[in-house]
Image (cartoon, rainbow, N blue to C red):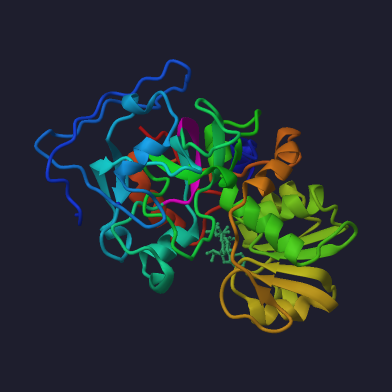
Amino acid sequence: MDSILSSTTTFHFRNPLLSPSFKTHSPFSHSKISIKNRIKKSNTNSSQSPIRIYASSQSAPSAEATTNSSSSSSIPSVMKAWTYSDYGGVEVLKLESNVEVPQVKEDQVLIKVVAAALNPIDFKRRFGKFKASDSPPPTVPGYDVAGVVVKVGSQVKDLKEGDEVYGDINEKALDGPKKFGSLAEYTAVEEKLLALKPKNLDFVQAASLPLAIETAYEGLEKAGFSEGKSILVLGGAGGVGSLVIQVAKHVFGASKIAATASTAKLEFLKSLGADLAIDYTKENFEDLPEKYDVVYDSVGQGDRAVKAVKEGGSVVVLTGAVTPPGFRFVVTSNGEFLKKLNPYLESGKVKPVIDPNGPFPFEKVNEAFSYLETNRATGKVVIYPIP
Ligand SMILES: NC(=O)c1ccc[n+]([C@@H]2O[C@H](COP(=O)([O-])OP(=O)(O)OC[C@H]3O[C@@H](n4cnc5c(N)ncnc54)[C@H](OP(=O)(O)O)[C@@H]3O)[C@@H](O)[C@H]2O)c1
């Protein structure tokens, strides 16, 4: 586990709508923004048509007129992106090099993606688990992003070109998530879902945070967690759980934190701030005498979780069946949450946790998903660099 700590402490998707004509694209250059690896000339073959993915949640190309960017002519019209056109396993993922760069709506910015992170919702969505409310494939997956603003919509108030930002690009995780996700060179995102990247964090670290830390924070808030309360975190070593521990301790002021993981991750739980690390391979947490003000279940053990809560306490359930008094919620992406949390990140109290098997390069997004789908990741699986 030491290796996890030291390397992370940093506690550290044809294509309906094929274009009838090829659109030329110019290599990107923007003198105001200096990030390594941010743009390479697209290697799209000129005999190919760009893949277009349009969705009601994002604008068709005519939206260009609504932007007030001076650099829109220097943004390429096509990009590399991971895509899928049918629901399924990791095998449906394809790395394409001629996907149309999304256009920005009035309230959105276009981000040159530097790093992105994977979340279980990405593969659950790809499996078709949320078909009824999903924007139908073809899809560019990816919720979490860190990158640089390269274009702003006409109604964008605070962000400007060159700003380094991070966020979860889908306000409602399950309700019409965007067709153009973050596993691409560019993604278009509403300003209100973003925050400036914490100054002390690199893009990998920043990309690891949004969906997971917003879930951690929102769940604790909904549970009425507050200073002096105790908490049991089920799945303390995962992307969400590792942040629930830290946010409960440093942002909310928990009096006692217990968390569950397998044997090899117990020291890791303690390094995150857990007072008690429970080995789920050896003990049933619900059989232990101590009960908690809040139980935060990121594993899907709602029936057992309710047995470990004090009378009148709260049980937050992220996945699986819910047993009263437990409640389930679905995270809402909100840049204001990130802005609130930035001071804790910038002071180093709350640290990003990057799975030591990563970051995975962009070409290996499919391998990264296979790994995440083992349900054994520690912290967050991050993709970097993105061309
Ligand atoms: N409702 C929402 O808004 C929302 C938001 C975010 C996530 N979620 C859901 O919450 C779940 C967790 O997300 P995540 O990003 O944290 O996943 P994750 O990072 O992939 O979780 C992997 C971790 O889970 C741990 N784990 C697996 N089985 C366990 C068990 N029986 N007891 C304790 N720990 C166990 C593993 O530790 P070991 O290797 O030690 O087993 C591993 O470290 C997913 O189902 C996700 O879809 C829901």
Q: Residue at x 39, y 35 (%)?
A: 386
Quadrant for the C terminus in the image? top left
Describe residue 136's horizontal placement relative to residue 201 as left or right: left
Give the residues in magenta.
Answer: 142-151
Q: Residue at x 32, y 26 (%)?
A: 73
Q: Is residue 295 above or below residue 353?
A: below
Q: Is residue 300 visible to us here?
A: yes
Describe residue 383's horizontal placement relative to residue 286 as left or right: left
Farthest residue to the top: give it: 31
Is 147 in the magenta? Answer: yes
Q: Is residue 262 above or below residue 19?
A: below
Q: Is residue 283 above or below residue 275?
A: below
Query: For residue 248, which quarter of the picture?
Result: bottom right
Spot occupied by residue 180 in the image (x, y as percentages of width and height): 37, 49
Query: For residue 76, which quarter of the picture?
Result: top left
Q: Residue at x 32, y 40 (%)?
A: 101
Q: Is residue 76 above or below residue 87?
A: above
Q: Residue at x 48, y 65 (%)?
A: 175
Describe residue 15's horizontal placement relative to residue 145 as left or right: left
Farthest residue to the front: give it: 65
Spot occupied by residue 63 in the image (x, y as percentages of width and height): 36, 42
Is 317 in the magenta? Answer: no
Spot occupied by residue 97 in the image (x, y as percentages of width and height): 24, 39
Spot occupied by residue 40 in the image (x, y as percentages of width and height): 31, 26
